[in-house]
Amino acid sequence: MFISRQFYKITYSAFFTVTRNHQVAIVGATNEVGQTTALLLRTCPSVSKLVLHDTTDSTPGIVLDLSHIPSKSKAKGYCGSNTLEEALQGSSLVLAVGGLPQKSLPTSQSVLSQNADFIKIVSSAVTRIAPVPFFGIVTEPINTLVPMAAEVMRHQGCYEQNKLFGVTIIDALKAQTLYAKANGFVHSECHVPVICGHSRTTMVPLLSQASPKTVLPEETCLDLTTSLRDYTIYEKASSPLTPALSIAYSVYLFTQRILEAIDGQISQVNALVENNDFGTSYFSGLVEVNKNGIGEMRLYSDLFSYECGILEQSIRQLREDVTVGKKILEIV
């Protein structure tokens, strides 16, 4: 009888869980991250319409190329700054992936200025869409541009903080793979929380909370933490590389989980969101997401002593990054 009831629950859930189809818009879609993200989302079952927007002349060709991949979803492209608002209409989720890649640390003023201009334009356009869509920012530096986007939307009088995310899943993926490699674990069975911010000096991997559990000397933990925070891991070629493939994959995962949440499921994503619980107004971590947006962020206890020290330093730096973002409208 118990087995029958369980089977009934499983089959009922499988057949009667409602999955709506959604429009997802990728802004800045012609760069490496944008194109790879579009490729991954082209066959995503929850995406009924995939919109690509950019200001470059290559946009129509990329959309045509994408349309040659068999899929039930529609692919549509928009080119030019004057088509952005039209492109976003009807979107459940907007992904901002454009701008210059962050190849130098710290971020140069020219990169910050150009990327800030891009996010200002997209943020402003998002506020003119009703209902306001979920908004994921991938453009760097996330620590600064997410707070700036919030200020833009707040000034427009249409800011829904529960729908604004800095996409940081890449940090958790990187931690997962390096932790597994260091310990000889199966990658898919590993999990390492990464909290605080999204940069070399603000990202804090919590090896104390990693699974499967293992006992490592503190020196080894510190070395692994440095590797996890160090962007130069991608500089293995003759010139610095932008990790477009892994970032695009993380955006794909983010999109899947956000659409699940919009469909009524409780989902979780790694993201930088507005949060005042940690001594700064923004914080990155694993957050619960439902159809209304951001819920609770997961908390951790029993951290290693060195993690507490790194976290304290990182929060100070994150606070500075956030302040720059909040004030950038005055200087850009």
Image: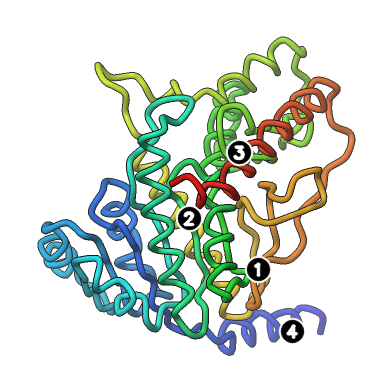
User: Along the horizontal axis of the image, is 298 left or right of 265?
Assistant: right
Can you identify the residue that label 1 sits on?
Answer: 162
Instruction: Determine which of the numbered discs, if any, sits on residue 124 in the image.
Output: none
Instruction: Determine which of the numbered discs, if any, sits on residue 137 in the image.
Output: 2
Which comes sooner in the sequence, label 3 or label 2? 2
Neighbor class of circle 1 (other Cα within 10 Å; few <14, some 14-19, many 20+) is some
Element carrying mark 1:
helix
Q: How far is disc 1 from disc 3 in space, using C-alphas?
A: 21 Å
Residue appearing at x 74%, y 55% in the figure:
275
Q: How far is disc 3 from disc 2 in space, using C-alphas?
A: 16 Å
Residue type at mark 1: give it.
Asn
Of residue 81 and residue 167, the one placed in the foreground of this image is 81
Which comes sooner in the sequence, label 1 or label 2? 2
Residue type at mark 3: give it.
Asp
Judged by depth in the image, the label closer to the viewer, 4 or 3, is 3
Percent across and percent down for residue 195 are 69, 40
Q: How far is disc 2 from disc 4 in space, using C-alphas?
A: 45 Å
